[in-house]
Amino acid sequence: SYELTQPPSVSVSPGQTASITCSGDKLGDKDASWYQQKPGQSPVLVIYQDSKRPSGIPERFSGSNSGNTATLTISGTQPMDEADYYCQAWDGSTAGFGGGTKLTVL
Amino acid sequence: QLQLQESGPGLLKPSETLSCTCAVSGGSISSQGHYWGWIRQPPGKGLEWIGGIYYSGNIYYNPPLKGRVTISIDRPKNLFSLKLTSVTAADTAVYYCARITLDRGILNWFDPWGQGTLVTVSS
């Protein structure tokens, strides 16, 4: 499967900006998606095609993708944003997920 | 609103076959432009893609699991299924189903996801 690398954890203060990176071979040539997962819940799509937000996802969530790195940015982070975040991309017909980043808002 | 609902065996013994089903409601499994996928998550760990199927029967599997996995689709019942043979404790996980959107003919994002079904492999 396609290997994607994320930092295990990121910490941010409420109201500040959190950035979570995802690295993979030629990732910038692919479409990257991001998922938020809170404890005991299913993953929820928050960014698709690098930077698009699904309906219902707050504007503070944004994304970018270039070179070998995709980045999820949360501006004005709120306590409710504390969760695990996973990046995902396809290498042909094989999907890869990053190992996940635990975002702590403290 | 499209919804997916998994069902599974709960508890299995090593060497048995895991069978899970994903029932789709609020939309047709035969819609063009979407694959239907399975993803699993061991307790406390990350997500692993298992495979996906198109309404026409075209299937993609994750290579590490390819020899043990079968995904099938039942269009009249609007559901798709997963079978995983010769399970071990390493197959203990929450099994999710999700819709995969095709964009410009390219496999893309997973949305929505089902609520997941926990399958435990233990003797």
Image (cartoon, coloured by chain):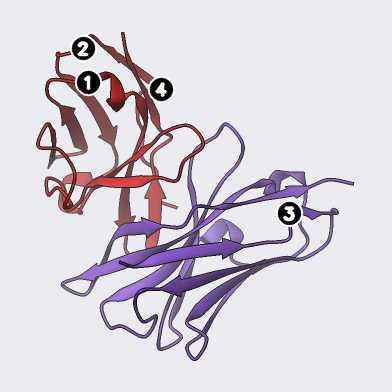
Residue shown at the point (46%, 77%) measured from the top left: B59
Q: Can you tell which chain is drawn red?
A: A
Q: Secondary structure at mark 3?
A: loop
Residue A27 location (% of width, % of height): 23, 45
Residue shown at the point (31%, 74%) measured from the top left: B34
Q: Secondary structure at mark 4?
A: loop
Q: What amino acid type is highlighted by mark number 3?
A: Gly
Classify residue B78 as left or right of residue A54: right
Residue shown at the point (12%, 31%) measured from the top left: A60
Q: What amino acid type is highlighted by mark number 2?
A: Pro
Classify residue A91 as left or right of residue B18: left
- Subunit ID for the residue under disc 4: A
The alpha-carbon separation of the residues under discs 4 and 2 comes to: 20 Å
Asked where in the image residue B28 lies, by quadrant, the reply is: bottom left
Q: What amino acid type is highlighted by mark number 1?
A: Gln
The residue labelled by disc 2 is A14
Residues at marks 4 and 2 on the same chain:
yes
Residues at marks 1 and 3 on the same chain:
no
The alpha-carbon separation of the residues under discs 1 and 4 comes to: 20 Å
Residue shown at the point (20%, 33%) measured from the top left: A72
- Subunit ID for the residue under disc 3: B
Residue A8 has which mark? 4
The residue labelled by disc 3 is B10
- Subunit ID for the residue under disc 2: A
Pointer 4 or 2: first along the chain: 4
